[in-house]
Image: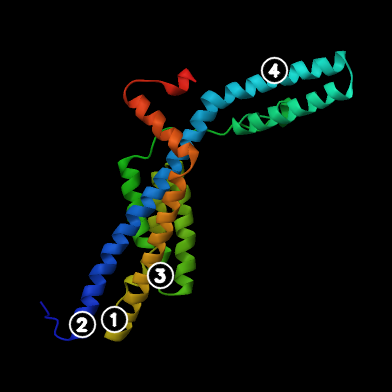
Amino acid sequence: MTQLSTPEELEVSRRAKLVGELVDQLAERELEVASLTNDLMRFRQRYAQRIGRLFAELDKLDLLIAKRLAQSEPSSQTQKAANEALMRARQSAAEARLPPPDAPESEQPPQEELFSEPPSNELKQAFRKAAMRFHPDRATSEAERVRRTAIMAQLNVAYGKGDLAAIEKLTQEAGIDPEEITGDDIGSQLVRLIRREAQVRRRLAELQSQMQALASDEVYELWQSVQKAEAIGADPLGEL
């Protein structure tokens, strides 16, 4: 084993270890943000399926009543009420991922599919491994940053869909990490590590802000309360 002798070599070793630890943290934070984003999206869809549909049906009934009233008692007021009912029905239908109440049958868009199951541990591990390898903030050149950004965008889409095969395929097709190539002089290595540490710390701060924004969303609070209630056997969405 080669013994490190110069202060520069010792500093490169120390920084390399620190950057490695930060990259591990970054991969975990990326996974946390991606998981929470998907959890909230699944909850939104679940809420829309169970609760939003009911509001949409009520607004659709209100629209039918308003239309018939406008037909039987034509006036500016009844027509205005019918128009307002139509706007409400369109909005609630959109929120519930349902076709607009006044759309012809042939023009009705397909309903958005719900996410079936939460991400498995295998999926999370594959995403974390890929994020560690291809995260843009590990790049030391602009060209490599662009390449990694494109890869991470595809990885996020695959993770959101629960597509483990796509993540594995992307990881294989992305090839060898150019940033793993070594052989530069000590000074260049040190500069590269300092820059990489700054990049990773900046991204960690961005992810922290994203997590705080997600946690401050009213949907997050509702999701948390529903989870707690369901953990003790209650059915809050059913009660609603």
Numbered badge on residue 9 = 2
Q: Is residue 2 left or right of residue 162?
A: left
Q: Which quadrant holds residue 174?
A: bottom left
Q: Which residue is mark 1?
A: 183
- In the rendering, at what x and y percent does residue 203 appear? 41, 62
- In the rendering, at what x and y percent does residue 229 appear? 37, 25
- In the rendering, at what x and y percent does residue 77 appear? 85, 23
Amino acid type at circle 1 is Gly
> Of marks 1 and 2, which one's residue comes earlier in the chain?
2
Amino acid type at circle 2 is Glu
Q: Is residue 122 left or right of residue 37?
A: left
Numbered badge on residue 139 = 3
**Label 1, label 4: how many angstroms apart (C-alpha)?**
72 Å
Q: Which residue is mark 4?
A: 61
- Please report the residue visible at 46 percent of the width from the left and 18 percent of the height from the top: 239
SS at circle 2: helix
Position above or below: 192 against 208: below
Can residue 79 be seen here? The reply is yes
